[in-house]
Image (cartoon, helix red, strand yellow):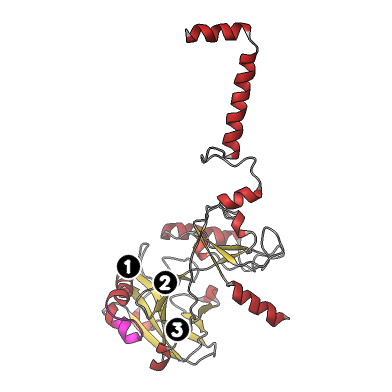
Amino acid sequence: MAAVFLVTLYEYSPLFYIAVVFTCFIVTTGLVLGWFGWDVPVILRNSEETQFKTRVFKKQMRQVKNPFGLEITNPSSASISTGITLTTDCLEDSLLTCYWGCSVQKLYEALQKHVYCFRISTPQALEDALYSEYLHREQYFIKKDSKEEIYCQLPKDTNIEDFGTVPRSRYPLVALLTLADEDDREIYDIISMVSVIHIPDKTYKLSCRILCQYLLPTQGQFHDLKQLFMSANNNATPSSNSSPEGESTDRSLLEKAGLSESEVEPPEESSKDCVVCQNGTVNWVLLPCRHTCLCDGCVRYFQRCPMCRQFVQESFALHSQKEQDKDKLKTL
């Protein structure tokens, strides 16, 4: 009976067409505007509605002061045969201990011992954790705020020209920075910093760079120190020392070593303006891509990073509102 009724309605009444079209219109409008609560692509919603739909978790951060700083001076001239020059910048008197040919496995076991067994606050503590699994050791005293240049080199009698093919069992150089005065270790949350440094040799010619840095706090943890990527200025120009051939060679070597190019990308000249509004001060770091490109007003509107289009899982502010108010008062 229902089928006969529908056929009769189809043949004799134009209201049937009107009802079908109206029903389809109502359902489509409800889906687009989100009346039914279903997750559908945002097409016609305005920015205010998108603001309330966006859910990016804000990561709670704790500010600590790192008393250590370490950079490579003129990395293009560093090699296993000629050595390497390191520049330190420490807030207190410190000790720089360099371990040539340090075992990769023993180093990460030592970091785990810092978490579960004993704190690596002195060079002797790291040596005990490494079980002397290194080829040569050098130690230097660093004065506070001196920015000294330290030249390190393997002794010629070791007869070491390379550390083998990738993957390697030893790092070319591991640099440990610790506080020289025991009383200073009670002032700072960070008691030591471990830097893993790659130095080119005959087998592996990737340019010299810091592969990773680990901060060791007193609470028995270790944190991987990562670079933040700021938005580049329009007038930033590439370095004159770099060439397309050298960049392609480095890229291929990085792929063999299992490193992503973004993790070792050279720092660019940064801008403090938000990439969206070009007015607010950049204050938010987006994770996991680590792009620092949004201000306080624009961060709420984005679920994807405006620089790389990667989904934002978490974000955190570089400065709290109180710190920003203090900076404004200082400028006034």
Q: Residues within 10 Å of mark 1 (few under 14, many from 20)?
A: some
The magenta segment is 117-127
Q: Earlier in the sequence, mark 3 or mark 2?
A: 3
Residue 52 placement (x, y as % from top left) = 58, 52
Task: Give the residue at mark 3.
Answer: 152
CA distance separating discs 1 and 2: 22 Å
CA distance separating discs 1 and 3: 21 Å
What amino acid is at disc 1?
Ser
What amino acid is at disc 3?
Cys
Q: Nearer the viewer, residue 99 or 26?
A: 26
**Tag 1 near tag 2, CB within 8 Å:** no
Left-right relation of 29 to 206: right
Q: Is residue 29 above or below residue 54?
A: above
Q: Residue at x 29, y 78 (%)?
A: 130
Q: Earlier in the sequence, mark 1 or mark 2?
A: 1
CA distance separating discs 3 and 2: 26 Å
Q: Earlier in the sequence, mark 1 or mark 3?
A: 3
Q: Nearer the viewer, residue 133 or 231?
A: 231
Element carrying mark 1: loop
Task: Give the residue at mark 1.
Answer: 169
Q: Nearer the viewer, residue 170 or 224?
A: 224
Q: Is residue 302 above or below residue 26?
A: below
Left-right relation of 69 to 178: right
Residue 37 placement (x, y as % from top left) = 52, 41
Task: Give the residue at mark 2.
Answer: 223
Q: Residue furthest right?
A: 332
Q: Residue at x 57, y 30 (%)?
A: 27
Residue 287 placement (x, y as % from top left) = 51, 60
What amino acid is at disc 2?
His
Q: Residues within 10 Å of mark 2 (few under 14, many from 20)?
A: few
